[in-house]
Image (tube, rainbow, N blue to C red):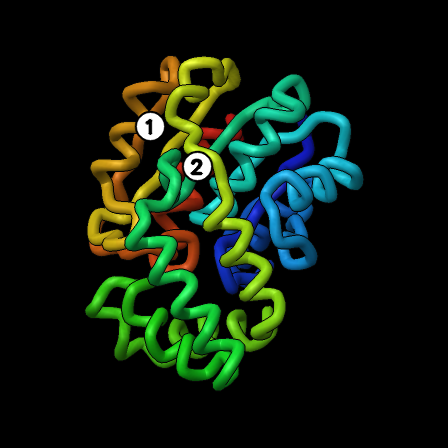
Amino acid sequence: MSDNLLLVPGLLCTRALFAPQMNEFEGRLNIEVADHTRHDSMDRIAADILESAPEKFALAGLSMGGYVAFEILRRAPERVTRLCLIDTSARADRPEQADQRRALIGLASKEGLNPVIDILLPLLIHPARMADAVLTHTIRDMMRDTGAEAFIRQQNAIIGRKDAREELSAIKCPTMIIVGEEDGLTPPKVAQEMAGRIPDADLEIVPDCGHLSTIEQPAAVNRIFAGWLGL
């Protein structure tokens, strides 16, 4: 496999989303975190990332990062040596989901990001972790660091993304799919759908975990990453 690992965060998330994995695997891999904040379409985000990415790389994306990963695979499948899809879906938005995103865009435009953060945070982690001040502060900091303007660009890119389900059977690289058992946004059933369509894909369901598995259950995710990366 390649010694390069490219990580793509989720909506309103920064490199802090992968801090436990970077701490665990830096020194053994060349790790880069993609910038997915500058454009409002998946094709432009993917093109920008590929322009600066290594020639060959293992690719891991969480949630929106998975949507970006599908666009990268459309453009340059030969450059991706391994794939990890984390708490994500190959489906496009349903009309009501797109409407919800547009409502959040309107709210962020009028009132800034703080009310959006208050709405989204409970959806992102296991209910039992809402009392974890360190975790919730980390998430709020990521969101504030991303900012309202980038959030609006990201949401527009997500709304406009393509459905990737019919393309999954063409994925040839070793693929790992990770999902939190209590992920309410991209639940295990959509992870199972992807695993059923990607040849020889592995699926790991992380117990006691919501949508942001990399920081909710880092030890479990690190163990899965080690196996996926052959380390």
* Numbered mark located on residue 85 in the image: 2
SS for callout 2: strand
Residue under the point 65% across and 50% down: 33
Image coordinates of residue 173 in percent, x first then y, are 52, 18
Describe residue 4's horizontal placement relative to residue 202 as left or right.
Answer: right
In the rendered image, which quarter contains the N terminus? top right
Describe residue 56's horizontal placement relative to residue 16 as left or right.
Answer: right
Task: Name which quarter of the figure residue 99 lies in.
Answer: bottom left
Q: Are marks 1 and 2 in contact (CB under 8 Å)?
A: yes
Describe residue 163's horizontal placement relative to residue 96 as left or right.
Answer: right
The mark that comes first in sequence, 1 or 2, is 2
Image coordinates of residue 197 in percent, x first then y, are 33, 19
Front one among 105 and 214: 105
Task: Name which quarter of the figure residue 153 lies in.
Answer: bottom right
Image coordinates of residue 169 in percent, x first then y, are 41, 15
Does any portion of residue 25 appear in the rendered image? yes
Front one among 107 and 14: 107
SS for callout 1: helix
- Depth check, mark 1 against mark 2: the one in front is 1
Q: Residues within 10 Å of mark 1 (few under 14, many from 20)?
A: many
Residue under the point 79% across and 41% down: 52
Q: CA distance from mark 1 to mark 2?
A: 9 Å
Label 1, on which residue?
Answer: 194
